[in-house]
């Protein structure tokens, strides 16, 4: 963990200068950690906004495995988020009178979502680019429409309400602050694992597939297996986020899982820098936090937001923090990123 | 000498086009063999059949005594066949050394769990991969350039990197598709001696497709000539140079009477 943090730190210092990184980093960490415990105006609002940003960072990191690493354009990522959310929603509410523990359902939700990811992966293995995007887009919509129409099972558009709050050692986690910290622990865990995968045999195989699938197979990579692995791992992360979302909200509706979630998550990856883990974080700040910061501009909010996206894509098409490969040949005391 | 690769009456069609037609070939183990022929003769198609990228309609491909046609490319690679491409196909957004490490994929074993948990097995393997890749970089003369993104390397270095990536698989048979394409005479002479060194030092059997006759005649121990998907001649440099059918295929009827393919 410390190893990884060091690498990230030296990457950033190289780019922005040591002092800036230190100050910004310390302020950010302190800000994030103490935000819920200090008292200030509209605190609940900010806890909610930042918590949601965290949730989108998790989703972004998950989709980044599929789109950023393996290069498989998935426009239906929301489906896995929905599967995670409904798994917990249905197994811990009055809907069927089942009240399983959150800590039991969380891995189950992740597993079910991963399974759905692999199942979606199988028929689309032969597709590339645009075709893959269309099929996954359809898959996302199918899941949402099913949730809407399987009334006996999901309660249709009335949604699942009264979802249990997680309990830890007899203590009920029912306030926004609890979920805020839960989300940030998960952000750290997912970012950490994702970073390790990125620079491993698995991650390199994914990137090779992204760069040139035919050649990747000629390197001895079982591309079928690795693509399914990418779909599965991405979906797993989406399922985790979904389960937390439904526990946090206490009620879920099919409309929570519409196409715009997929589009938002994909956009934040692209804006942050495709394939880049710090990029996902910056992208989420820009796309999820910013619209709420701009709330005071009321009517002009979406206009400003749209304008920002357009300017961003023209000025910096590779994203805020483009992904980088590590130096491996000439390793110095602290590894440095490869610069163009 | 036994043959490491054998093609028996291989036929590959694209619709009505016979890209490779009843083609038989034996590549002796430890040799440098060459396939030549005019553009569109089916040379690269044959390579694609060998590595499993295309499924031939008829015939057999025997590698090391085992039939391999119909196997997926990644498995064929695992048996010890590597290739390079006519138009360089590196993983351009990965560093040079990473390209080589990806080339070792068939010989490494780390699973997702190993990668996520950084198990001792994974650490050891990563270390060995890097060391081996550094050795290969040195072998192809790219020491110190391993951390450059593949797309930022100069053309000649990209060619050599592609060979290093292919060698990372520890191939018994190396297929080189026009390795000197786009090189000046000096560079291609240098590459020619490099290919010879490959065979002599590593014992790798080499089968190449080549257009540059200086290169072909200098290093090939066996030359096979393809035209319209069929084999029209086979032999050593001398035999091929004087074969009227070959001259006809390259230069057309009439030319065959007074000319020879030799340029020096």
Image (spheres, rainbow, N blue to C red):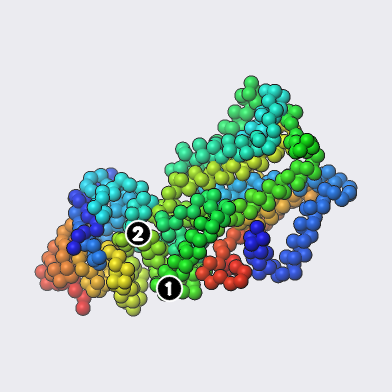
Spot occupied by residue B240 in the image (x, y as percentages of width and height): 16, 67
| Residue at 44% across, 63% down | B100
| Residue at 43% across, 70% down | B135
Quadrant of residue B64 within the rendered picture = bottom left
Judge from the rendering whether residue A118 lies leftward or rightward of residue A335; answer left or right. Answer: left
Spot occupied by residue B6 in the image (x, y as percentages of width and height): 22, 55
Residues packed near mark 1 inside 10 Å, few (<14), some (14 to 19) or many (20 plus): some
Identify the mark nearer the N-term, 2 or 1. Answer: 2
State the residue position of label 2. B82
Kind of element beneath mark 1 = helix
Kind of element beneath mark 2 = strand
Does residue B228 lie above or below B211 as drawn?
A: above
Quarter that holds the N terminus of chain A: bottom right
Does residue A128 lie above or below B199 as drawn?
A: above
The residue at the far left in this view is: B257
Query: Which of the two residues, B170 or B188, is positioned nearer the viewer here?
Result: B170
Q: CA distance from mark 2 to mark 1?
A: 19 Å
Whether residues under marks 2 and 1 lie with C-beta atoms below 8 angstroms apart, the answer is no
Residue A271, visible in the rendered structure = no
Quadrant of residue A28 within the rendered picture = bottom right
Spot occupied by residue A21 in the image (x, y as percentages of width and height): 73, 65
Which chain hosts label 1?
B
Residue B9, visible in the rendered structure = yes
| Residue at 74% across, 36% down | A166
Which chain hosts label 2?
B
State the residue position of label 1. B138
């Amino acid at each position: 963990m410390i190893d990884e943090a060091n690498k990230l730190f030296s990457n950033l210092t190289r780019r922005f200068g040591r002092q800036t990184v230190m100050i910004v980093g310390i302020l950010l960490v302190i800000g994030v950690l103490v935000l819920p415990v200090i008292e200030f105006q509209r605190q609940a609002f900010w806890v909610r906004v930042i918590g949601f940003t965290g949730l989108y960072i998790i989703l972004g990191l998950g989709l980044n495995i599929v789109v950023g690493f393996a290069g498989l354009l998935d426009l239906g990522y929301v489906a896995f988020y929905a599967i995670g959310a409904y798994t917990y929603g249905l197994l811990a509410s009055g809907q069927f009178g089942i009240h399983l523990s959150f800590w039991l359902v969380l891995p189950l939700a992740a597993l079910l979502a991963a399974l759905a990811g692999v199942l979606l992966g199988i028929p689309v293995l032969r597709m590339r680019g645009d075709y893959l995007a269309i099929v996954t887009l359809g898959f996302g919509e199918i899941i949402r429409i099913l949730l809407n129409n399987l009334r006996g099972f999901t309660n249709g558009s009335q949604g699942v309400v009264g979802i249990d709050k997680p309990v830890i050692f007899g203590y009920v986690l029912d306030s926004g602050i609890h979920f805020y910290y839960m989300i940030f622990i998960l952000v750290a865990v997912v970012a950490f694992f994702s970073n390790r995968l990125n620079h491993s045999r698995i991650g390199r195989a994914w990137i090779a597939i992204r760069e040139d699938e035919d050649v990747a197979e000629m390197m001895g990579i079982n591309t079928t297996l690795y693509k399914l692995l990418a779909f599965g791992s991405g979906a797993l992360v989406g399922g985790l986020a979904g389960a937390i979302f439904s526990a946090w909200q206490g009620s879920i509706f099919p409309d929570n899982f519409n196409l715009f979630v997929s589009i938002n998550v994909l956009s934040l990856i692209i804006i942050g820098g495709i394939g880049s883990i710090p990029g996902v974080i910056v992208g989420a700040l820009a796309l999820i936090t910013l619209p709420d910061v701009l709330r005071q501009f009321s009517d002009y909010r979406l206009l400003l937001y749209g304008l920002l996206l357009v300017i961003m894509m023209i000025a910096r098409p590779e994203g805020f923090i483009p992904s980088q490969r590590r130096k491996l040949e000439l390793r110095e005391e602290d590894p440095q990123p490869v610069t163009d | 000498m036994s043959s490491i690769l054998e093609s028996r009456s291989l036929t590959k069609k694209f619709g009505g086009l016979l890209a490779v037609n009843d083609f038989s070939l034996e590549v002796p183990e430890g040799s440098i063999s060459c396939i030549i022929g005019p553009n569109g003769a089916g040379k690269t198609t044959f390579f694609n059949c060998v590595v499993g990228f295309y499924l031939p309609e008829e015939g057999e491909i025997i590698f090391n005594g085992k039939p391999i046609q119909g196997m997926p490319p990644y498995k064929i690679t695992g048996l010890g066949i590597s290739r390079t491409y006519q138009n360089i196909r590196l993983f351009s957004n990965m560093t040079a050394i990473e390209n080589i490490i990806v080339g070792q994929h068939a010989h490494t074993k780390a699973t997702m769990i190993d990668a996520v948990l950084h198990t001792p097995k994974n650490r050891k393997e990563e270390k060995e991969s890097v060391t081996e890749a550094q050795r290969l970089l040195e072998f192809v003369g790219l020491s110190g350039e391993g951390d450059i993104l593949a797309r930022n390397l100069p053309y000649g270095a990209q060619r050599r990197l592609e060979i290093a990536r292919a060698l990372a698989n520890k191939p018994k048979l190396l297929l080189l598709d026009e390795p000197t394409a786009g090189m000046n005479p000096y560079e291609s002479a240098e590459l020619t001696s490099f290919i010879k060194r490959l065979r002599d030092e590593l014992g790798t059997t080499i089968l190449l497709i080549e257009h540059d006759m200086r290169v072909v005649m200098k290093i090939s121990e066996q030359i096979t000539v393809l035209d319209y998907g069929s084999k029209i001649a086979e032999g050593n440099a001398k035999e091929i140079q004087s074969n009227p059918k070959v001259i006809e295929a390259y230069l057309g009827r009439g030319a065959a009477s007074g000319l020879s393919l030799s340029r020096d």
